[in-house]
Image (tube, grey):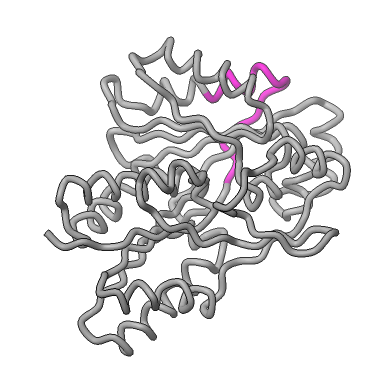
């Protein structure tokens, strides 16, 4: 079977250890901080998650910049020159122009390198909702599946991906334009915790609200119980905004509802973390049927 490269962006939440183990290349988005630009992914040094989120607690949300066409050309072209085709696993086109920039670069390069293939999969997801597809593609490649098989599997199953999350501070969603400033102020005073999910267009939408932090975590576990397969052995993942203790608590609640051997837990990478803020908690898993 053909060998092919798997590339994704830093929104996938794949930490360097996961990316290296799965042989996945990660292209970073850019965070625009008061101290200047910083990549949302750097495999040369550990991510100081606590320091990053402590800074957010003090300064509030920071801006991020998508990956542009030129950056994709720079990342893709050496791979094509080496004789490999590319599967690019993209974050949702509903929340970023990154996927569109990847498709533009792919079109230009396939004209320049006839016979080479770049497949761009719009996962309609972000964080581990995206990253799980990259990991699955790596597993399929290890099992000798080809690029087209891996791409088609992702396309056929992306609407089975459940993405549910909650945030601890509504200010971050307000600054990102997800909710109004007035709603954020009222919600914060009432200790309201929103429940959000990914829509069929790959956008973030509300799916409920509860009062209090613990209830929001239990609500995520209930959503898992409602939507997850009874005997699923698929990857289940949690991303958190510097609140590992709560992430471990949520994982324990999931294990009470299913016979799970493991739950993949990682801190939110800087790009997504900048928008959801400290205390954010997200859960990703497959439903047996399309849920969007």
Q: What's the residue at 15%, 51% (across, down)?
A: 144
Q: Where is residue 161 in the image (x, y as percent from the top left)?
A: 38, 41
The residues colored magenta run: 205-220
User: Is residue 216 rendered magenta in the image?
Assistant: yes
Residue 96 lies, with reference to residue 115, above or below; the image says: above
- On the picture, is 263 further left or further right than 286? right
Q: Where on the picture, by quarter, is residue 277?
A: top right
Q: Which of 160 and 133 is in front in this view?
A: 133
Q: Nearer the viewer, residue 192 or 236?
A: 236
Residue farthest front in this picture: 44
Q: What's the residue at 20%, 82% (across, down)?
A: 115
Residue 42 lies, with reference to residue 65, above or below; the image says: above
Q: Where is residue 34 in the image (x, y as percent from the top left)?
A: 85, 59
Q: What's the residue at 83%, 39% (across, down)?
A: 57
Q: Position of residue 245 (x, y in %)?
A: 64, 19
Residue farthest top in this picture: 256
Q: Where on the picture, by quarter, is residue 105?
A: bottom left
Say which quadrant the N terminus sits in.
bottom left
Q: Where on the picture, by quarter, is residue 286?
A: top left
Q: What's the residue at 58%, 38% (across, down)?
A: 196
User: Is residue 191 rendered magenta in the image?
Assistant: no
Is residue 183 in view? no
Q: Where is residue 192 in the image (x, y as percent from the top left)?
A: 75, 28
Say which quadrant the C terminus sits in.
top left
């Amino acid at each position: 079977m053909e060998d092919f490269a798997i590339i994704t962006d830093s929104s996938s939440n794949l930490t360097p250890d996961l990316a290296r183990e799965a042989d996945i290349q990660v292209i970073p988005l850019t965070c625009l901080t008061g101290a200047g630009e910083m990549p949302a992914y750097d495999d040369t040094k550990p991510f100081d998650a606590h320091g990053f989120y402590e800074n957010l607690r003090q300064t509030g949300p920071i801006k991020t910049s998508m990956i542009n066409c030129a950056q994709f050309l720079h990342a893709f072209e050496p791979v094509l020159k080496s004789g490999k085709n590319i599967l690019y696993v993209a974050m949702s086109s509903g929340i970023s122009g990154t996927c569109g920039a990847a498709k533009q670069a792919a079109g230009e390069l396939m004209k320049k390198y006839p016979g080479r293939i770049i497949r761009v999969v719009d996962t309609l997801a972000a964080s581990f909702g995206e990253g799980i597809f990259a990991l699955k593609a790596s597993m399929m490649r290890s099992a000798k599946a080809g690029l087209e098989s891996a791409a088609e599997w992702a396309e056929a199953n992306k609407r089975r991906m459940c993405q549910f999350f909650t945030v601890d501070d509504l200010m971050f969603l307000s600054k990102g334009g997800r909710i109004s400033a007035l709603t954020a102020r009222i919600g914060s005073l009432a200790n309201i915790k929103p429940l959000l999910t990914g829509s069929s267009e790959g956008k973030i939408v509300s799916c409920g609200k509860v009062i209090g932090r613990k209830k929001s975590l239990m609500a995520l576990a209930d959503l898992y119980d409602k939507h997850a397969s009874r005997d699923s052995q698929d990857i289940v993942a949690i991303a958190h905004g510097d609140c590992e203790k709560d992430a471990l608590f949520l994982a324990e609640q999931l294990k009470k509802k299913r016979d799970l051997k493991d739950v993949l837990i990682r801190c939110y990478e800087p790009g997504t973390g900048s928008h959801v803020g400290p205390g954010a908690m997200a859960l990703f898993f497959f439903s047996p049927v399309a849920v969007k």
